Image (tube, rainbow, N blue to C red):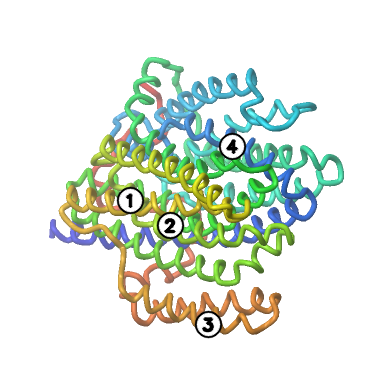
Amino acid sequence: MSEAPAAAAPDNDLAALARGGRINFMGFLLRLAARLPFLFIAGRMYGAEALGRFAYAVLIVEFVAQLATLGLKRGLAQQLSKTDKPHVCVTYDALLVALMASVLGMAILFLFPRIMFPNSEIYGMEWLLPVAVLALAWSDVMLAALAYRHDVGATVRARAIVEPWTISIAALAFAFISKRDGLIFAYALSMIGALVASAIPFFRTYGRAAGWRPNPAESWGLARRYMPVAAADTVEWASRRIDLAILGLFATPALVGIYYVAQNVASLPSKLKTSFDPILGPVISRSLEEGDRVGVAKQIRQVGFWVIAAQAAVALALGIPGEGVMGLVGPVFVAGTAALIFLLGAEVIAATATTSEAALIYIARHRNMMLSLAMLALQAVLTVALILLFRRLGWPPAWQATAPAVALCLALVFAAVTKSRLAGKLLGAPVSGWRWPLIWAAAAAIIVGQLTHFVPEWLQLSLGVPLILASFGLVIWLKGFGPEDRLLFKMKKKDIAVDLPAPSTGEARRARPNAGSGACR
């Protein structure tokens, strides 16, 4: 009798992963529906140059916010699973850490706003943009705390509804007021909206911490403990941004704006991987607490396959009619089609590295950090080298702008191979989610996509994209999916709820009387 719960635990974990993935996949669709209008508004009403200026400013703000979370987006789950301290007090400590780091980052940006706007004049209220640092950092920590309680619905509302729709609507409104700064103001409003949407369920779930007092020494200890995780998170984030940062040193703001659009379209598949982040971290941390490393490998392998399949399908659907997709934003943006194709390929390659890293941040955080830094350095060197090479070959500026995307692909191949091998060795089982039916599904999608080239462009997008997705999905469903894979598509009524579900067997065994709200000690 005692062995039955343990045997059922992996099934419960897979069910939890599937449920979290389903809910956040709905969020991905909502984010997609809101993000495309924003790109359309930004490209058509503001133009490539204003979009490039906006892109660089946001790049700096989000980099500082990424540093300010200090790894707590993923480290908080492990901290909550181990502590004897009331969880509400741990989350308040994490918010204090993010506050201190955010204030430091904001102070630097307030004092040196030229960091955000290196190639344009600063006037008006632009200097208030760093306020978004605290909003973004606190929102991330609150959503991570809610994810530990399996409330991924909060992430969907904040990141897939409030944030993207606020920036789209605000960008449209500000276009009639200030086309120079409207995008920046719209972004600041969207971050504040996301913070409010995160704070409401957070305080409803965790409540007030009776007796909690700020303890800077303890908070610093928490931050120092998760420095390697923070470095890994920052490197992963930077690997998707350093190409834009380097390109901005070599190209005009207009080309930066074109690349930014390609990057945003290509980053949509990456949201599919992050659909599993809120639930994957807690599941892995619990399995590791129980000593089930082979089970962790199975979880990563399962999620890895789901992510690769979904990202490949979306990449093919957006890449085959790439000119039409980029042309939606504006005729000038068609020049970024080649960059779009390489960036979409990079997202598929990245799936193996990012899912492997989900375990490495717990079992080999320092080695994972070193591999991440090596990948980032390789990407930076390759980006500069390829830009200079393409320039020496006399290629047009639009072709030169594809160099960062090519460099990203090559660097991610290195990360995927090294991280998956390290994770497999430490867990005692392979972690790669690759399956050969992916090749046949991709072949079917490519054939269907090529046939759609014979119809008008509007029909390629309205009919071709769904047909590409359907052909890929049909083959992978018939040839690649097993019973456990089909858990992902068994939508249940409780998937709509956001309340804390009953704890798993592993959680119940370790439940502590003071793990929720209560007086801090």
**Image depth: mark 1 or mark 3 in front:** 1
Q: Residue at x 65, y 52 (%)?
A: 258
Q: Amino acid at mark 3?
A: Val
> Which residue is labeled 4 in the image?
249
Q: Determine whether 329 is above or below 391 in the image.
A: below
Residue 38's place in the image compared with 450, above or below, is: above
Q: Which three-letter amino acid code belongs to the residue tagged 1?
A: Phe
Q: Which of pointers 2 and 4 lies earlier in the amino acid sequence? A: 2
Give the structural element (helix, strand or loop) at label 4: helix
Q: Position of residue 285 (x, y in %)?
A: 29, 44
| First in sequence: mark 3 vs mark 2 | 2
Of the two numbered discs 1 and 3 on the same chain, state the one appearing first in sequence. Answer: 1
Residues 256 and 189: in front is 256
- The reply to whether the C-beta atoms of the residues labelled 4 and 3 are less than 8 Å apart is no
Q: Which mark is residue 448?
A: 3
Q: Is residue 27 visible?
A: no
Three-letter code, disc 2: Gly
Residue 225 appearing in the image:
yes
Tell me how far mark 3 sits from mark 2, CA to CA. 31 Å
* N-term mark: 4 or 3: 4
Give x and y (percent) for residue 468: 53, 77
Circle number at residue 20: 2
**Image: 169 above or below 125:** below
Front residue of 107 and 99:
107
| Quadrant assignment for the C terminus | top left
Q: Amino acid at mark 4?
A: Leu
Q: Are marks 1 and 3 in contact (CB under 8 Å)?
A: no
* Residue beneath the point at 63% across and 43% down: 251
Q: Residues within 10 Å of mark 4 (few under 14, many from 20)?
A: few
**Where is residue 161 shown, x and y percent of the image?**
63, 52
Residue 414: mark in rendering: 1
